[in-house]
């Protein structure tokens, strides 16, 4: 099968298209034919692994890399192991590898039936569904961690990124009054996702507006501590992706699927790349200018499969 292989840590140029063996599912595994994947900021971080994280993370993901990158995916079940009961061949699914040393930038991957995997939303394309798990589950996890409640004022810093675009929509689902913070070029996007107010950080500082928020969600991990104190209400909660890793669970993915099919959530796709262009996708995401998600289209005949 075709797959992207990370030959070593470092520049995107070390990500190369290779022919590798197709994985064989174990008794409790499903073999997934991957139609679409994504490139997240987390993927780019892992490929570059700063010195401070070098040893512990490289022990987990391999000292010399030599692996298939990517976490999010959408596709169909191509085969199931002998003990699999949750899925069957032909099921349309989406999910994430949850940090395991298996990657989604390949034509096939194996995943345990107990992994973060669910039936694909019926009203989403494979490309749209492939971009949901990481950003959507992260947004859901941190908003729940902040104990979001109806009619609360929620500020989302970095509202135009993958996590931020989902966070705006999920916060609105919970009945919050949402203020999104983004750059000038993305203010209309954030407003279109349901934000009640949008702050252009290139023109004003949200902390100078005199408003107090019940939850401040830093979806990019860049708010200075002093600004948080200025804008947080009494008994307000601050949550950030900089502190902690979201727990990814199938039941939460199923919850997001329900919101998607109810028309409460949509995916924002900035750019699409082919599998062969994965290094270009990493380079673009690494520039930190993307809005929403960057998708890898692994099967170029997706339009036919969407009609099946």
Image (cartoon, grey):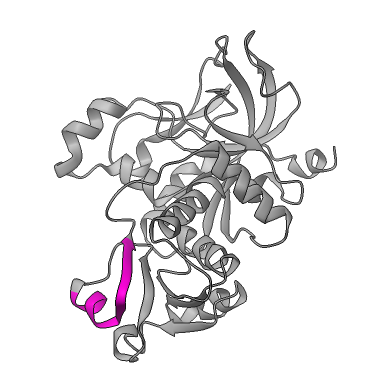
- Which of the two residues, 182 or 229, is positioned nearer the viewer here? 229
Taking 162 as reference, is 205 left or right?
left
> Residue sitting at 50 percent across and 63 percent down?
167
Q: What residue is drawn where x is 73% and y is 21%?
A: 88
Range of magenta residues: 226-239
Q: How many marks?
A: 0
Q: In the figure, residue 60 lies in which quadrant?
A: top left
Give residue 306's position: percent from left, percent from top: 79, 43
Q: Residue furthest left?
A: 52
Given residues 4 and 135, the one toward you in this image is: 135
The quadrant where residue 25 appears: top right
Residue 233 painted magenta: yes
Counting from the top left corner in percent of width and height, residue 82 is at: 64, 8
Residue sitting farthest toward the right = 308
Q: In terms of image quadrants, where is residue 12? A: top left
Q: Position of residue 273 (x, y in %)?
A: 57, 48
Q: Is residue 189 magenta?
A: no
Q: Where 212 falls versus 9 (above or below)?
A: below
Q: Is residue 128 left or right of residue 159?
A: right
Q: Name the spot of residue 189 as percent of width and height, x first.
A: 57, 74
Residue at image x 71%, y 46%?
121
Q: Is residue 223 visible?
A: yes
Question: For this view, does 280 lie left or right of residue 276?
Answer: left
Query: Is residue 274 among the parts visible in the rendering?
Result: no
Quadrant where the C terminus is found in the figure? top right
Which quadrant is the N terminus positioned in? Answer: top right
């Amino acid at each position: 099968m075709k797959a992207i292989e990370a030959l070593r840590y470092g520049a995107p140029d070390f990500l190369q298209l290779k022919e590798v063996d197709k994985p064989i599912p174990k008794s409790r595994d499903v073999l997934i034919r991957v139609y679409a994947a994504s490139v997240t900021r987390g993927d780019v971080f892992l490929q570059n692994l700063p010195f401070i994280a070098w040893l512990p993370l490289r022990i987990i993901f391999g000292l010399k890399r030599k692996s298939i990158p990517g976490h999010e995916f959408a596709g169909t079940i191509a085969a199931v192991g002998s003990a699999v009961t949750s899925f069957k061949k032909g099921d349309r699914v989406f999910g994430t590898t949850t940090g395991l040393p298996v990657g989604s930038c390949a034509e096939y991957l194996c995943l345990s039936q107990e992994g973060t995997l669910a039936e694909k939303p019926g009203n989403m394309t494979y490309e749209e569904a492939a971009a949901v798990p990481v950003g959507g589950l992260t947004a859901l996890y941190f908003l729940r961690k902040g104990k979001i409640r109806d009619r609360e004022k929620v500020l989302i810093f970095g509202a135009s990124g993958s996590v931020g675009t989902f966070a705006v929509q999920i916060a609105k689902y919970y009945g919050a009054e949402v203020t999104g913070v983004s750059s000038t070029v993305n203010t209309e996007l954030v407003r279109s996702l349901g934000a009640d107010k949008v702050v252009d950080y290139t023109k004003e500082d949200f902390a100078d507006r005199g408003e107090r928020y019940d939850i401040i969600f830093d979806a990019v991990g860049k708010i200075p501590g002093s600004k948080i104190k200025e804008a947080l209400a009494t008994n307000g909660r601050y949550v950030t992706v900089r502190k902690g890793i979201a727990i990814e669970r199938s039941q939460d993915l199923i919850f997001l699927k329900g919101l998607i099919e109810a028309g409460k959530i949509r995916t924002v796709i900035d750019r699409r790349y082919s599998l062969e262009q994965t290094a270009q996708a990493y380079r673009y995401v690494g520039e930190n200018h993307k809005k929403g998600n960057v998708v890898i289209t692994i099967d170029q005949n997706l339009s036919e499969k969407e009609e099946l």
